[in-house]
Image: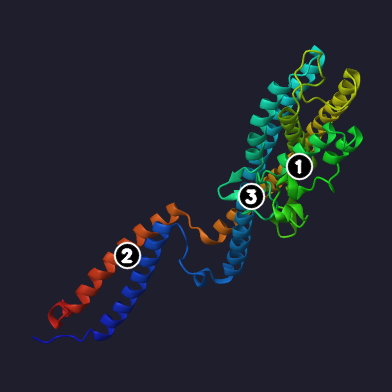
Amino acid sequence: MTFVSTLGQSLDQVERLKILQNQLGTLQTQLTTGKKTTLFAGLGSDVITSKKSRANFNALDNYLNNIQTANRRISMTTNLIEETKTQAEGLLGSLELQTQQGEYEIEALGQYANNLQGFIANLLNEKDGDRYLLGGANTLDKPLTDTGGLDTYSRKQIEDWVNGTLTTDQFIQSYRDKTLLTDTVVGYSAEIASGQAKSVTVRVDDNAEIDYTVMANADPFRNIMIAVSMIKNIDAVLDEVTLEANDPPGTITAPGATQQEQNDNFYRVFNDLAAMMNKALDQVDTERFKLAQAQAQTTQIADNHKFEKNMLANAIADVEDVDINEVAVKLNALTIQLEASYRVTATISSLNLANFLS
């Protein structure tokens, strides 16, 4: 039997099949991934748009993550500030109640202050994970440590006031003057006490950072801690406000030769401590307002970033994504074409002179 050479036709048909198979592979990948190509090079002239849009999209994503972290810490800081204020208000309310009743329950208020001191210190040392919230940029060092220095200082000044070494004015100055009662004595970390602690900021876009710093030694927190220590140690030093006729020898009272002088000296200090706490509570609101402003700014910027991300996602989709329905139709048509080509190739390969001529 004589065969007809179909090598040329077969080779040509094989090349056609390779092209169809490549097209089939591309369509199958598109159907699976929803993307035109798995390589940037496959986008042709659209590659620049894709790369730029993706870079901007990722940058916005990073900024949104920064903002989310900052907002969590701002919320935590706001909560601890509010709790500090609530606790300090409780002590102040008890102080003012004593005045209204015309008596001063030294022991009861001293115990209240003693319990409160550690609680507020814990609030000022609040952490987000392993990061202290009120230590500035130095987030790994504890902002406030109970070294005993504040209580020792407070007791010494009260004793000096009682024995006449300090006048009432000097005693008041001793706990109000920061050069006398330093941050180091209060127990603040070396970096905070030195004033070298840097601010806490969040990078929200290419050109802006927002400061949301609240320091543990800010005046309201510092003064609350001092007032609490003074009230606590007044109880530790004094037995009564004034000396009564039936008091035993050695009873310790506020300084003064008469009950009236003792009463006047004590209530000058008492009223000053109450005023100190009142002012601190007002200043706490200022710290909270600063945080609220920072959070409002970050939230607004986050909303803008989310809108921009949506726009970029659309731009990326326009150049990278395919219409799945359209791909499915093309894939079905190509499958039919490929099957037909296989049959043609098979026919050409088995062609001989008899069926060629028939």
Would you say the residues marked 3 and 1 are in contact, meaning their CB atoms lie under 8 Å apart? no
Q: Which residue is mark 2?
A: 337
For marks 2 and 1, give the CA distance.
94 Å
- In the picture as drawn, the residue positioned furthest to the front comes out as 249
Identify the residue at horizontal 62%, vertical 65% (top origin): 52
Q: Which residue is mark 3?
A: 142
Q: Amino acid at mark 2?
A: Gln
Identify the residue at horizontal 67%, vertical 41% (top origin): 124
Identify the residue at horizontal 66%, vertical 52% (top origin): 308
- CA neighbours of label 3 inside 10 A, class few (<14), some (14 to 19), many (20+): many
For marks 2 and 3, give the CA distance.
73 Å
Residue 57 in sight: yes
Q: Amino acid at mark 1?
A: Tyr
Q: Which residue is mark 1?
A: 153
Residue 254 x/y as whole percent? 83, 26
Q: Amino acid at mark 3?
A: Lys
Quadrant of the rendered image containing residue 206: bottom right
Quadrant of the rendered image containing residue 71: top right
Quadrant of the rendered image containing residue 154: top right
In the drawing, what numbered circle is on residue 292?
A: none
Q: As rendered, which of 150 and 137 lies closer to the eye?
A: 150
Which label's residue is closer to the chain start, 2 or 1? 1
Residue 40 x/y as whole percent? 52, 69
Quarter holding the C terminus?
A: bottom left
Q: Secondary structure at mark 1?
A: helix
